[in-house]
Image: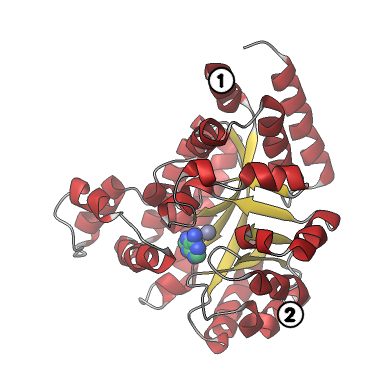
Amino acid sequence: MSDLNDLIDRLPKAELHLHIEGSLEPELMFELAERNGVAIPFKSVDEIRAAYDFSNLQDFLDIYYVGMNVLQTEQDFFDLTWAYLQRAAADTVRHVEIFFDPQGHTDRGIAFGTVISGIDRALKQGEAELGISSRLIMCFLRHLSEEAAFETLAQAEPHLDLIHGVGLDSSEMGHPPSKFERVFARAGELGLKRVAHAGEEGPPAYVSEALDLLRIDRLDHGNRSLEDAELVERLVQSEMTLTVCPLSNLRLCGVERLADHPLKRMLALGLKVMVNSDDPAYFGGYVNENFRQTAAAIDLTRDEIITLARNSFTGSFLDDAAIARHLADIDRISLSPA
Ligand code: ADE
Ligand code: ZN
């Protein structure tokens, strides 16, 4: 195991499913609450961590939206993103495709420009100082209306040079992808990539809708696709990347124990899966911790771990030359002795 942990520590990897607001550690939440004079319903960092005991996605989201109230200024969004990038660098993450939830901020009166400029400033510093390349993906909150999503897309238009794609997140059940077909079509016309959370809690039909109606380039989670053999075959044949988040699935009770996680089965079926932390401050681990705990729980092999790292780059929105460079680095590191 220590050999595999050493490999995990050294392998270059990309993270493609990371909500930047979900990387808000309790310590920074407290610091920003004080700095901005914002009240939070917790008296200590320990009390915050104790509250992170979720039964399902909605349980988590209720706390996630409270936590983000402390984010007020451009500097706050910079500090949040910079903290994540430093943590990612320690896990040999070389490329990140980061989600942000503008509606979680604009609905509280924070300007879209404040949010994106703080995040972007940190991403540029991350490239310059940490050598981490990045893309930014703007998510629509699916529990809100189609009209609100269109408004958000309009607010994003002056900033499209900084935004690579759109995504769909928040409460899945009862909010099928079809609700956002038109806004995703418009995003496509604007030249944006399209991704969506589907099959995290929702049924396989939501995954099919994301493919057929939202015309997604990548599938976030997708776990419940396994309930439909034809859908699995379609995902395999189309080489669709699935951004899997094992500790998130555990903490949101998608699996009872990590040993029950379907990642190994997904690999065996030929699905193009890779590993992510989703909301690491809430789910107990950044990307290497996801790799380590999952590898131990389901006996991932050395070759499977290397495949997951390779998929993280081939499933990214990097250009072919950059992907080839990262794959060559993976080959070099996986062949060299520790
Ligand atoms: N927003 C932040 N994390 C999420 C998740 N795991 N699923 C849906 N929406 C989210
Ligand atoms: Zn997510």
- x and y percentages locating residue 166 in the rendered image: 64, 68
Q: Nearer the viewer, mark 2 or mark 1?
A: 1
Residue appearing at x 35%, y 66% in the figure: 59
Please identify the residue farthest to the right as the structure is shown: 237
Q: Which residue is mark 1?
A: 6
Give how far apart the Cα atoms at labels 2 and 1 are: 44 Å
Q: Tell me if residue 56 can be seen.
A: yes
Residue appearing at x 68%, y 36% in the figure: 309
- x and y percentages locating residue 102 in the rendered image: 49, 70
Foreground: 226 or 306?
A: 226
Relative to 167, say whether 265 is above or below.
above
Indicate left or right for 265 with 42 as reference: right
Secondary structure, mark 2, is helix
Relative to 45, say whether 66 is above or below.
below
Foreground: 49 or 28?
A: 49
Quadrant position of the C terminus in the picture: top right
Nearest to N terminus: mark 2 or mark 1: 1
- x and y percentages locating residue 185 in the rendered image: 74, 80
Cβ of mark 2 under 8 A from ligand 1 = no
